[in-house]
Every structure is written in C-alpha cells, then in structure tokens.
Amino acid sequence: MYKLVIKGGIPLSGTIKSAGSKNSSLPILFASILADSPLTLKNTPYLSDVSTTLRLLMDMGAEFVLESDGSVCVDSSKLNNLSADYELVKTMRASILSLGPMLAKYGEAKISLPGGCAIGTRPVNLHLKALEELGATIMVKNGYIYAESDNLVGATIDFDQVSVTATENIVMAATLAKGTTIINNAAQEPEITDLINCLKLMGANISGTGTSTLTIEGVETLSGATYTVCPDRIEVGTYLVAAAITGGSITIKNCDPKDLRVVLDKLTDSGANIVTEGDTISLSMDGKRPTSVNIKTSAYPNFPTDMQAQFTALNAIADSSSTVTETIFENRFMHIPELLRMGADLTLEGNTVVCRGVKSLTGANLMATDLRASASLVLAGLAAKGTTTIDRVYHLDRGYETIEEKLKSLGAQIERVQD
Ligand code: EPZ
C-alpha cells in the first residue's frame, strides 16, 4: 500500500488542467451496454473507478481499446455474461449502473447488491422500485439482485427522494423501453446532463435535460458515438479549496464554471478573489486567512455533498466559527476525527459540525477512509505546520487523477511513498 507525505505551509501557485468527470464517465461507460456499436469516450479521467468499470464490462464480454490520446473505445454490443460479481461491485458501488442498461438491452441481469460504504448504508431501493414500475421482475437473494424483463414498458416514475444514480439507471433503461417514460423529481446534477447528451448522440429521444422532470421516448436501438466527458467539477472544487486553504493563487483550465456556481460563491464568501473566463477559473487568496462560511449540503443546484469535507477543512483554520450541515448521507464525517488529531476544534452535533477556526493545524499521521474525506485530509496537510502522512491512498486514487503530481506542479511538497 502507499501513503502520501506532505510538508505543509506552502501557498499553492500555478496553473493546472482539470480531468474529465468521474461521475459522468462511469454512467456513460455503462451506457455502452445499450449500443449496437462501439462508444468512444474522450477526456476520460485516469482513475481506479474507471479501470474497475472497464474490468467489469470486460468480465461481461465487452472489449475496449485505450487510444493514445487517453480516450477509451468500448464495444459492449455482444455481452455474454449478464452479471456483476460481488468481488468487483464491493470495490465500486456505481456498478449498480449496469442494471438498467442490461435489463433494457438483454432483458436480464444479476448484479451484486453494492452494500454500504464509509459514508452510509447506500440502499438501492429507489433503483429497484422504479425498474419494477417499468415492468421488470426483481428478486433479491443471497446478496444479489436478479432482474428480468421481456420488454420494459414506459411509465411515470415519481421518485420520493432525489437520487443521482437511480435517475441515471432509469434514464438508461427507458431509452429502449416501449413507449414514454416520465421521471418526476429527477436529480439534476451536471453529470446527468452529460449522460443524457451522450445518450441523445447515440440516438435516444430525451427531453427536459437539466430539469427535475425528464421525458424519454423509447427507441428501437442505440448506436455507438464519440463523446467528450465534461470536466470534473468536484476535482476542480477540491483544488480551488487547496489554493484557498494555503493562502495561494492558482488557475484551473478546462472547467465549466456554471457547474460550480454555489461552490464559487462560498469561496468568495471565504475571502477568495475568483475570476472566471470561458473554461478557466482563477482563485487568489493573497495570503489571507479564510473567513468562516456556513455550509448546508443538498441536491444540485445547491451545495454539493461531495465538497462538504473539503469546506470543513477550510473552516477548521478560518477566522471564526461556522456550521457545516450534511443532509444527503448519514455518516459523511469520517474526516472529523482525523482533523481533530491535527488540532482542529470541531464538534459534531447530529448532522452538523460546529467549526471553531484555529490559527493553524499541526501535521499528523492520518488514515484515509473514503474518497472526499481523504481529499479533506490532503487539504488540511497542505495548510498544516509540519509533516502529515496519509495512509490508504487508494481511496484518493478512485476520484483524483495523479493527485500528488498535480499538487507538486502547484508548488506543494508532497510525495507518494510505499508503506
Ligand atoms: C452519486 O451517488 C455520486 N456517485 C456520489 O459521489 C454523490 O455523493 C451522490 O450522488 C450525491 O450527489 C456517482 O455518481 C457514481 P444518491 P448516489 O442516490 O447516486 C439515498 C463521490 O464522492 N438513496 O444521489 O449513490 C442515499 O442513501 C460519490 O464521487 C436511497 O435511499 O447517491 C442518499 O442518502 C460519493 N435509496 C440519497 O438517497 C436509493 O435507492 C442520495 O443518494 C438511492 C439513494
């Protein structure tokens, strides 16, 4: 296993380019199951979750080629194994996104229940109920989902709760269903818009993109296409906080500022000077200590839960007190005990962290637990006095492309070393 060793206290400066979105790439790769010919994805990020998805598709009988420019050409048109085994699914919950496409294209699927993870129980009841409303027969036995359908029939799906991947699963299933599917209370994350844009390029008939009501007219077949994945707004947000927490000044290219409006507003409130120009975002903190900002996460277009841990780290060294409330996941606070070990003054009250800013944190030996909690520990280490080590770096590699290289290019003193 590997760990990161960070020597903190250096204000970041320089320019980096964002990677393609992890949470777009995963559903779009699974959408290749719907196509009768190869799908080529450009700007795919180099992440372990993407490799896991390609391995899962390969186990199902798909073939893929990694092009020299980093794009991935995947042909999932002749699957011969309609199952996703526990051994792979347990490492990546998003494997549930193979369920809708497999049902729509092949009429059957056997998928391991994803199980929970560090941030919560992560049920999939909304996915299963909605697929049954499209006519699927679903049975859950021995930790697996067994799904069958002669042919899916369009229906009106009313989600009791907003769910990103449940919305994505139903959109994909509905593209080949007979008739019209209307999804009410659909999630509106930019990654869903990206998936829909790719599906339409493949021949799907979808309207309402970017709203909470989606209408999908089933079509006979979908073909492959060539599609460029949108920038990863959470990666961009994380690096912007890295600049803010170290009092630095950076520029990030290949962004889509409109997907980050709420995060940029919060960074401005924390004292950062933000300039956006086309696909470029620049942030400068000019050495200032951050101003405390109150955060409450909820579904897009509100403050993203995937940026909660990062802002908790920023608030930990801010100039006064603040609250950070998590409303999406029940246990997205695994970073708190580790930040406390660095001298942060944080108190968890229910689903709210009360942050009393301290002047500085001190480096410590830390343990990564889940993707975004681990990112917040990196940010804290970059700001802290002294040296911080972070074990189990594989959590970070799921969602951040060569994180130490990008941070080094911004002046950070950070190394990846073997345990
Ligand atoms: C997606 O997860 C993202 N993952 C998550 O990003 C992100 O944090 C989350 O959306 C919220 O924005 C991918 O896109 C691959 P949900 P998802 O279904 O779809 C409950 C990261 O860091 N729920 O929108 O699994 C659920 O427990 C990851 O990149 C049910 O109760 O999240 C949660 O409380 C972490 N039943 C709420 O809904 C269901 O069937 C929202 O979860 C489904 C969800």
Image (cartoon, rainbow, N blue to C red):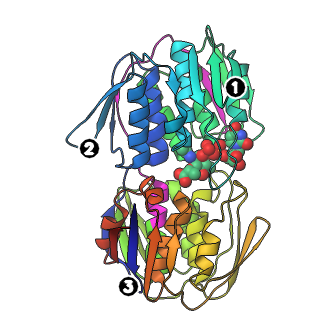
Label 2 vs label 3: CA separation? 32 Å
Residue 361 located within the stretch drawn in magenta: no
Q: Amino acid at mark 3?
A: Ile
Of discs 2 and 1, which sits in the foreground?
A: 1
Would you say the beta carbon of the disc 2 residue lies within 8 angstroms of ligand 1? no
Q: CA distance from mark 3 to mark 1?
A: 53 Å
Left or right of 39: which side holds 376? right
Residue wearing tag 1: 141
Quadrant (top left/top right/bottom left/bottom right) for the N terminus: bottom left
4 sits left or right of 132 in the view: left
- Label 2 – label 1 distance at C-alpha: 39 Å
Let me know if residue 155 appears in the view: no
Q: Which residue is mark 3?
A: 10
Q: Amino acid at mark 1?
A: Lys
Identify the secondary structure beneath mark 1. strand
- Residue 24 in percent (x, y) is at 47, 42
